[in-house]
């Protein structure tokens, strides 16, 4: 706020009190030869800024009469005197009856010699729709997408097949073409199993079902382990052989179905251990029967297998 200076002259000291407003007011009164009884409606502001000493004079209606920034060179007394001279000059413009022999305003301090700046490089024109910042600092092009490197993958192992509430020795063989860094590939698998024996009427028979499956494989890769998820159609070879019958046959057949497998293996440049779980499902119905005997047996629709082995990458 602007503080009255009687005269009703007002002042505000903001920030540092150098020069003090009372000192500036006293010097203005001295310059204009004002008595304590004389009052004015004007107000003034003396304020230190980084750019210099800001001096302002306003009328009674808050309109600006004068503004000026003086150099900060000199003592508080010298700054107060310079401010007072400027204010007194403005007041004589408003009140000509105060005109008299006023001291000349304090000259501004000479500006330090400016050093010549080196010429700036010529700026290249920027095409429409492109900001200058983006032209000077273009964004780097996106890195090229890595090309999937496919490699052959062979796996071989041994385990057990669970079907018809029985376990049987089984092996597995798998051949895949899968990206080394992970992703979608293709795999072929075969599971040969040992024969199982079942009773049927007065005799018994042996049977086995060997699936061959082909389908897509999705590989997930970590620093130490790879996981392959595979699924697809399966074609199984069926073989039956009768025992203790008057006449025996060794019929063969086929069954269509599907397979699903999960395979985990250790990382290695050419070799790695492998663990494999797989399942098969055959929706069709296959029956085994003997002539003259009412008994018959239906092959199970599902088979489950668990295996361990090794993988080889050429």
Image: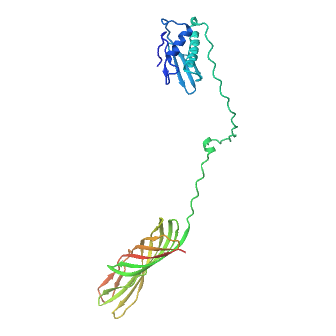
Q: Residue at x 55, y 69 (%)?
A: 150
Percent of width and height locating residue 251 = 41, 87
Between 113 and 131, which is closer to the camera in this rendering?
A: 113
Percent of width and height locating residue 207 = 37, 84
Between 179 and 59, which is closer to the camera in this rendering?
A: 59
Vertical placement of residue 44 versus 275, above or below:
above
Q: Residue at x 57, y 6 (%)?
A: 98
Percent of width and height locating residue 104 = 63, 13
**Residue 125, quarter of picture:** top right
Q: Residue furthest bottom?
A: 246
User: How many marks are shown on the rendered structure?
Assistant: 0
- One can see residue 94 in this view: no
Task: Left or right? Give the position of 239 relative to 33.
Answer: left
Task: Left or right? Give the position of 149 relative to 190.
Answer: right
Percent of width and height locating residue 9 = 49, 12
Q: Residue at x 38, y 78 (%)?
A: 161
């Amino acid at each position: 706020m602007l503080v009255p200076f009687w005269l009703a002259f007002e002042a505000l000291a903001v920030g540092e009190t150098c020069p003090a407003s009372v000192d500036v007011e006293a010097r203005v009164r001295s310059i204009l030869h004002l008595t304590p009884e004389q009052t004015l409606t004007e107000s003034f502001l003396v304020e230190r800024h980084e750019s210099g000493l800001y001096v302002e004079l306003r009328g009674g209606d808050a309109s600006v009469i004068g503004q000026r920034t003086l150099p900060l060179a000199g003592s508080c007394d010298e700054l107060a005197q310079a401010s007072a001279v400027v204010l007194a000059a403005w007041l004589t413009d408003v009140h000509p009856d105060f005109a008299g022999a006023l001291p000349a305003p304090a000259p501004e301090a000479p500006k330090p010699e400016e050093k010549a700046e080196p010429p700036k490089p010529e700026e290249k024109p920027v095409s429409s729709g492109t900001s200058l910042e983006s032209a000077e600092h273009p964004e780097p092009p996106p890195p090229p997408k890595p090309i999937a490197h496919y490699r052959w993958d062979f796996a071989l192992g041994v385990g057990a097949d669970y079907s018809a509430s029985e376990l049987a020795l089984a092996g597995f063989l798998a051949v895949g073409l899968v990206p080394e860094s992970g992703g979608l590939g293709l795999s072929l698998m075969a599971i040969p199993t040992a024969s199982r024996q079942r009773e049927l009427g007065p005799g018994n028979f042996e049977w086995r079902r060997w699936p061959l499956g082909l389908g897509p494989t999705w590989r997930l890769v970590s620093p130490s382990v790879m996981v392959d998820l595979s699924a697809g159609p399966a074609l199984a070879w069926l073989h039956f052989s009768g025992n203790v019958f008057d006449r025996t046959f060794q019929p063969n057949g086929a069954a269509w179905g599907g397979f699903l497998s999960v395979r985990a293996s250790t990382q290695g440049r050419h070799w790695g251990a492998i663990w494999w779980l797989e399942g098969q499902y055959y929706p069709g119905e296959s029956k085994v029967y003997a002539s003259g005997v009412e008994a018959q047996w239906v092959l199970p629709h599902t088979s489950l297998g668990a295996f361990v082995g090794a993988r080889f990458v050429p």
